Image (cartoon, rainbow, N blue to C red):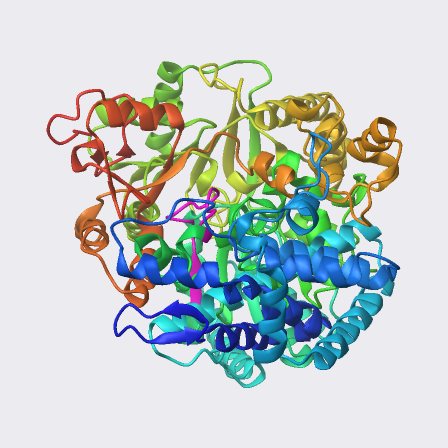
Amino acid sequence: MEFIAHIRESDGEHQSVGEHLLGVQKLAESYGEGIGIKHIAGLAGLLHDLGKYAIAFQEYLLNAVRNPEAPPKRGSVDHSTAGGRLLYHLFHTGKIERDKGVLAEIVGNAIISHHSYLQDFLNPELESNYLQRVRDKEAKELSEFPQVVRHFFENVMREEEFYGYVERASLELKVFLAQESPLSLEARCMFLTKYVFSALIDADRTNTRCFEENISDAPVTWQPKELFGSFYDRLMTEIGSLSKRSEADPQIKALRREMSEQCDKFAEKPSGIYTLSIPTGGGKTLASLRYALKHAQMYGKKRIIFVLPYTTIIEQNAAEVRRVLQDVEHILEHHSNVIEDENDDDEHMDGKINVRQRLKLAKDNWDSPIIFTTMVQFLNVFYAKSSRDIRRLHHLSESVLVFDEVQKVPVSCVSLFSMALNFLNHFGSSSIVLCTATQPALGFVEHKLHLSPEAEMIANLGDVVTAFKRVEIMDRATEETFGTDKLTEFVAEKMKEAQSALVILNTKSVVHKLYQRLCESTEGIPVYHLSTSMCSAHRKDKLNEIRQLLEDKKKVLCVSTPLIEAGVDVSFKCVIRSLAGLDSIAQAAGRCNRHGEHEVQQVYVIDHTEENLNHLPEIERGKRISRRILVDLKRDSSSHGGHLLSVDAMERYFREFYEDFDANLNFPVPKLGSNQTLTNLLFGPVKDNVYFQDYWDNRGERLPLFLANSYRTAAEHFYVIKDIGASVIVPYGDEGKEIIADLNGGARIEDLSRVLKKAQQYTINLMNHELMRIDKNGGLESCLDGQVLVLGESAYNQKFGFDGENESWEGPLMG
């Protein structure tokens, strides 16, 4: 009998189960080999679709293809349990060897979860989702289990060879867990499970996509050393000519050159976790790229990944790097997931191709030499309940990761972020750079970041900060307040003196209100609005217009949310910043007199009374600490290093900030109990595991597993930004409308990959209440069987994006 894994839609060709298992095994091995887990990852690939050797699956698959209008019911077929069940049966019963028992749990969990998400070893109801699948499940479709195993040994791998393969995997596990590291055993096993799961998901989807498109599934290869070498040469050519072209102050140019050279020298050090504290405007994008390219060459890294806080600067930095390196093909931008798949249990759809399967198979795995992405996407890779996100995890190993504006990590994610970086450095053979002008104190928290010795790349940092002083902070926040009317008058007054001004406020609503007021009251001066109500392509166009006006030395006024602070390369003569954390004030100051082209200019810090910060506790707390430091400086000008942006002031700020949020750093989950945290669910030891202790107390016996953590429950409660809502594609400009038309037209997997990549720049996030309101008023549409949401044309303003106050959706919105 022929056992079929997939049937190609275009010509009805069959892929056998054996071909698929061996193909996925080979790819998974290649993903795991670099960090020493070739056979562990390969074992997951080898067994993941073992259950397709069941007659029940073969009948399901043929019926599904013959009757596409009558799809099988969810749960009617189970082919993912068999592989995990085999490992449990062979290595987790009877006399158990610890290494093989742990191996069975780690690899088995990845296998049984490859059509959904990782299971809990122990959940809040004191049940084991893992054991329910591999030990307890007695469903009809598993009745063929003995025959399934026999077919595997006859058609894929002989039994003796299989046991030898498991021995090699077991040895790899022993070596992996014996490595010297600050990570606990539970943390090592959690990250290893997620790595194996990532390798399996990517290998499975890549092999299936390549079969469906009738192309080779051999990994796309580039020669990193040669490619990064040529990139380095082009970068050095650019750096050599930059000082001649730049109009910056000679001292600024000399300091930039010196810091860039320090980064080059630092690249010779072994991989580690380092800090790059170049002051705002110090050229950290090219300096960090210089480090990354040289280090990648010397230490054989496969890719370079830039992680930024906002989508705003992804296009800017990626465009700059493309220009400098003279390359488009090898530089990937990943802004956001156009399609969310947190509820993607699709086992009942496997084997045949439909719209949802095409979306799942579309290449979206970060397989590029240079990648630009966001902090949200990075954290989602490790912790979100999404196979689309975790598919990318294994590509973070053997890499250089540069985190730009690392101080923007949300408080609740600080410990999770630190642990992910510790894993990538200690086990993933990656080198990590924390790149910012305002380094957060991540070494002072419970699950702390383990920086390398002598981690800072820039020598004499205090002197450099002082030498880079281009602005003076003017305190207008401690003795008075501003409403929108008063601020409008203040901005108008400053525009009489300055050619350009930037106003940064903490919330979108006050930004929009001030923008409208300035449009009404300011004649003859272009006024611009920037916020996340606008898609990335929209903001990019507006920023290009602003830069042109600044370059032409024409009057221009911009009102923005804090998104403009993180590395956006603009330089205004005057900046007004609503009181916030010291790091935000420092970043705002970096948008004023950025290149030292003028004498020292003023940055005004004001207190805006109309900002509602009730749902923004981090901004509110940062504002309070900054106010205290401003008061201290008013009383004694020599305190905190003598100025608001000194190294001393910044260290004091972050220490106090993290002390205030100490209870939040481990991601508390109050719905699961007053003391429950995501860190405990994911990698808490058994002595701190409430569920483990309750299981023992209630049943009078230990959980019969080596691992007891709750991966799925943790993922279900994880978020980077609370209540972020959903991604919606917007009809901005001709290209936005063309993307929507393409998605509505249906496409091959290859075309979907291209269109979805473009669509990232035309998305915004809407809260659930906003989605409900615009849907009720007819402003929301969908395509691809409802998998992608689209904003109606009348609901998007070409000046300021989505207008949450509009209720009618009748006709075009006017700015």
Where residue 584 sits, quadrant-wise, is: top right
In the depicted structure, whether residue 398 falls above or below residue 140: below
In the depicted structure, whether residue 692 falls above or below residue 756: above
Image coordinates for residue 808, horizontal then vertical, percent: 17, 21
Image coordinates for residue 55, horizontal then vertical, percent: 48, 63
Nearer to me, 500 or 766: 766
Q: Quadrant of the N terminus?
A: bottom left
Q: Residue 190 magenta-drawn?
A: no
Image coordinates for residue 401, horizontal then vertical, percent: 61, 61
**Residue 248 showing in the rendered view:** no
Nearer to me, 271 or 205: 205
Nearer to me, 71 or 547: 71
The kind of secondary structure the magenta stretch mainly shows is: loop
Q: Residue at x 87, y 62 (%)?
A: 97
Nearer to me, 2 or 85: 2
Q: Which residues are magenta?
A: 331-347
Q: Residue 338 magenta-drawn?
A: yes
